[in-house]
Structures are given as structure tokens and as C-alpha cells.
């Protein structure tokens, strides 16, 4: 019981400190949570869990916009702002420890890769190639 409590407190502290260490760049081009959805099985899905006020997460927004230009017809791209009421449950669902976190789901919705922190497009592309996305 105490171990579970320590894990919960640790998770909350990590999210809290991650959010506090983030700033706001004012960049208006972002992939919003409202236009995303994971229900499109049959495609590889890229899930980004972060916060709109987090600097590394803002850097990932630029990467996701590039991904959207290049792969929008072949993969699903999803963003959950875990700093919102709507996004917070996904932090628990995916068991994230830090933001940003990227989760790759196969065509059946099963996780096949996970990364924490900023993830450049070139490295994302190598993970997509594992599932035949060129």
C-alpha cells in the first residue's frame, strides 16, 4: 500500500515539476487536442503527450506539423495536452513520467515504441519505418 502511494506521489511530483519548468513561446501554430483522435485503427498512430506551455513540447509541435505535412494520409497524429482537464486522463492511461512523451501504436492500437523528451523527425521516421511507413 505504501509503495503504491509513493509511486503516485512521485508521478504527481514529476508532472508538477515538468509543468513548472515549462514556458510559453507564443507560437500559434500547434496541433490541437481538439482535432485529434485515436479511434482510427488500421493506421499507425503517433501519440504525443505534453503541455502547450512546455518548451520541449512546443518544439515537438513543430515536428508534428512536419509529420502532418508528410504523413497525414498514412498515419494518425494525436496530441494530448495533459495540463488540461480533457488531456489529464491520458497521462494516466499511457503511464507517462515526463513530458513530452511519444507513444507509437501499431495498426491494432498496441504500443510498439515509446520515447521521452524531444524526438527529432529523422529519428521518428526510423521508428515509422519499423512498420513499413516510408
Image (cartoon, rainbow, N blue to C red):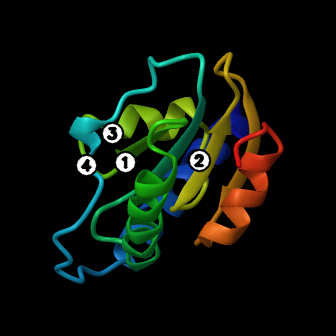
Q: Residues within 10 Å of mark 3 (few under 14, many from 20)?
A: some
Q: Earlier in the sequence, mark 3 or mark 1?
A: 1
How far across and how far down the image is residue 8, in percent?
A: 58, 42
Q: Which residue is mark 3?
A: 87
Q: Which residue is mark 4?
A: 32
> Is residue 119 visible to the viewer in this orientation of the structure?
no
**Secondary structure state at the residue bearing disc 1:** loop
Q: Which residue is mark 1?
A: 82
Circles 2 and 3 in contact, beta carbons < 8 Å: no
Circles 3 and 1 in contact, beta carbons < 8 Å: yes
For image coordinates 78% across by 58% down, the residue present is 126
Pick whichever, 54 or 47, lies toward us. 47
Lateral position of residue 81 relative to residue 77, left or right: left
Q: Report how far apart the C-alphas of labels 2 and 1 lie in the structure.
A: 10 Å
Circles 2 and 1 in contact, beta carbons < 8 Å: yes
Q: Residues within 10 Å of mark 1 (few under 14, many from 20)?
A: many
Q: Report how far apart the C-alphas of labels 3 and 1 lie in the structure.
A: 4 Å
Q: Report how far apart the C-alphas of labels 2 and 3 lie in the structure.
A: 12 Å
Amino acid at each position: 500500500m505504501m509503495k503504491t502511494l509513493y509511486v503516485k506521489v512521485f508521478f504527481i511530483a514529476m508532472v508538477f515539476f515538468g509543468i513548472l519548468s515549462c514556458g510559453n513561446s507564443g507560437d500559434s501554430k500547434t496541433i490541437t487536442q481538439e482535432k485529434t483522435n485515436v479511434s482510427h485503427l488500421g493506421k499507425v498512430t503517433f501519440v504525443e503527450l505534453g503541455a502547450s506551455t512546455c518548451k520541449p513540447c512546443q518544439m515537438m509541435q513543430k515536428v508534428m506539423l512536419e509529420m502532418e505535412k508528410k504523413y497525414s494520409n498514412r498515419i494518425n497524429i494525436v496530441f494530448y495536452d495533459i495540463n488540461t482537464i480533457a488531456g489529464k486522463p491520458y497521462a494516466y492511461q499511457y503511464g507517462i513520467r515526463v513530458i513530452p512523451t511519444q507513444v507509437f501504436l501499431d495498426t491494432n492500437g498496441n504500443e510498439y515504441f515509446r520515447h521521452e523528451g524531444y524526438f527529432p523527425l529523422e529519428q521518428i521516421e526510423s521508428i515509422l519505418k519499423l512498420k513499413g511507413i516510408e
